[in-house]
């Protein structure tokens, strides 16, 4: 019985349900577009801000309606140390191809050609709806296609158990949703959001000979945050640390951010979200090792613990 219930909750009828999008839906879709992958609690906060908390008792049902209408896809996450609770659905905006493939219970390479043709026919309707909704959110058509493609590829890897980075996105979403919600409830706007894959602070160091350990062979200090955004005129960079990075890699990342702050933007605030308290201590030690209180104050370490 438990397996049958799980399958039914993941099975979406190829005949998509009709649904009129409400302003709150567009806010949720816009945030999910930036977050890439998120669990329901992160999306709940976006919806709560959009409606000032009204009607939230029915939000879980509304998420299911958005899913049945094809605007979002969901996958079974199972237990995750990056999320509170034991079982969660993870949501994303994709072409529908990954969700349909996952429904077969087969790896993509094991799906026969006839079934694939059916999956592609089904996903065509999903893509049309998704593009229409995201255009209404104000995103550019070309960027929409890129995000849909990338999310689909990651979702395909995720449901088969391959390394995908999805849980990394979910950890970032867990933190960002709370940080943005608090700012929005103060009456501040979250602006100029650049998600992972687009966010890039890499720069050519004016003194590469003095910072050889930080630069690449061509003198670039590579810095690619998991998200960049602005609140109240302050620029923030987020790094989500799942705990897989070595101490040496963490120290190098911290020193590169410190170099950016010193050489380019003294106003940048770096937010580092750690999945475990153990990793938080490792990151905090790396920040403390900078030996400069001003730099340490600009790099804030948080923990999202279970």
Image (tube, grey):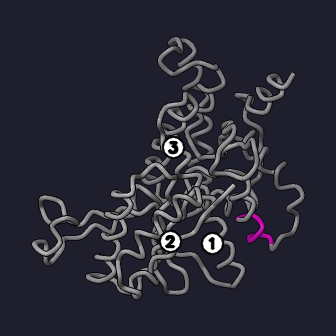
Q: Position of residue 228 (x, y in %)?
A: 46, 69
SS assignment at label 1: helix
Q: Position of residue 197 (x, y in %)?
A: 40, 55
- Nearest to N terminus: mark 2 or mark 3: 3
- Nearer to us of marks 3 and 1 is 1
- Tell me if residue 32 comes above or below residue 89 in the rendering: below
Q: Position of residue 16 (x, y in %)?
A: 73, 35
* Residue 180 badge: 1
- Which stretch appears magenta? 46-51
Give the quadrant of the C terminus.
Answer: bottom right
* Residue 271 badge: 2
Residue drawn 51% across the image and 43% down it = 151
Query: Residue farthest to the left?
Result: 209
- Nearest to N terminus: mark 3 or mark 1: 3
- Nearest to N terminus: mark 2 or mark 1: 1
Q: Going by the image, does 134 lie left or right of 14?
A: left
Disc 1 crowd rating (10 Å Cα; few below 14, some 14-19, many 20+) is many
Q: Position of residue 105 (x, y in %)?
A: 63, 20
Choose top left, top right, bottom left or bottom right for residue 64. top right
């Amino acid at each position: 019985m438990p397996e049958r219930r799980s399958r039914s909750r993941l099975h979406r009828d190829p005949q998509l349900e009709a649904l009129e999008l409400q302003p709150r839906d567009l806010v949720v879709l816009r945030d999910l577009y930036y977050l890439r992958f998120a669990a329901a609690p992160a999306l709940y906060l976006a919806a709560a801000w959009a409606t000032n908390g009204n009607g939230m008792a029915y939000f879980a049902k509304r998420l299911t309606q958005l899913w049945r209408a094809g605007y979002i896809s969901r996958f079974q996450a199972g237990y995750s140390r990056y999320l509170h609770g034991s079982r969660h659905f993870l949501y994303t905006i994709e072409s529908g191809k990954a969700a349909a493939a996952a429904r077969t219970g087969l790896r993509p390479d094991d799906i026969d050609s006839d079934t694939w043709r059916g999956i592609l026919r089904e996903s065509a309707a999903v893509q049309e709806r998704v593009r229409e909704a995201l255009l209404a959110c104000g995103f550019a058509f070309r960027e929409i296609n890129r995000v849909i493609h990338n999310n689909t590829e990651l979702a395909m890897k995720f449901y088969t158990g391959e390394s995908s980075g999805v849980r990394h996105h979910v950890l970032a979403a867990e933190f960002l949703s709370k940080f943005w919600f608090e700012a929005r409830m103060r009456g501040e706007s979250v602006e100029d959001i650049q998600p992972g894959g687009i966010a890039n602070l890499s720069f050519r160091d004016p003194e590469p000979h003095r910072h050889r350990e930080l630069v690449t062979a061509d003198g670039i200090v590579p810095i690619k945050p998991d998200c960049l955004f602005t609140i109240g005129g302050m620029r923030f960079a987020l790094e989500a640390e799942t705990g897989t990075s070595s101490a040496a890699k963490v120290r190098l990342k911290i020193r590169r951010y410190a170099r950016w702050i010193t050489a380019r933007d003294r106003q940048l605030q770096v937010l580092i979200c750690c999945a475990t308290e153990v990793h938080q201590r490792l990151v905090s030690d790396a920040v403390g090792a900078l030996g400069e209180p001003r730099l340490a104050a600009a790099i804030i370490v948080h923990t999202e613990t279970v």
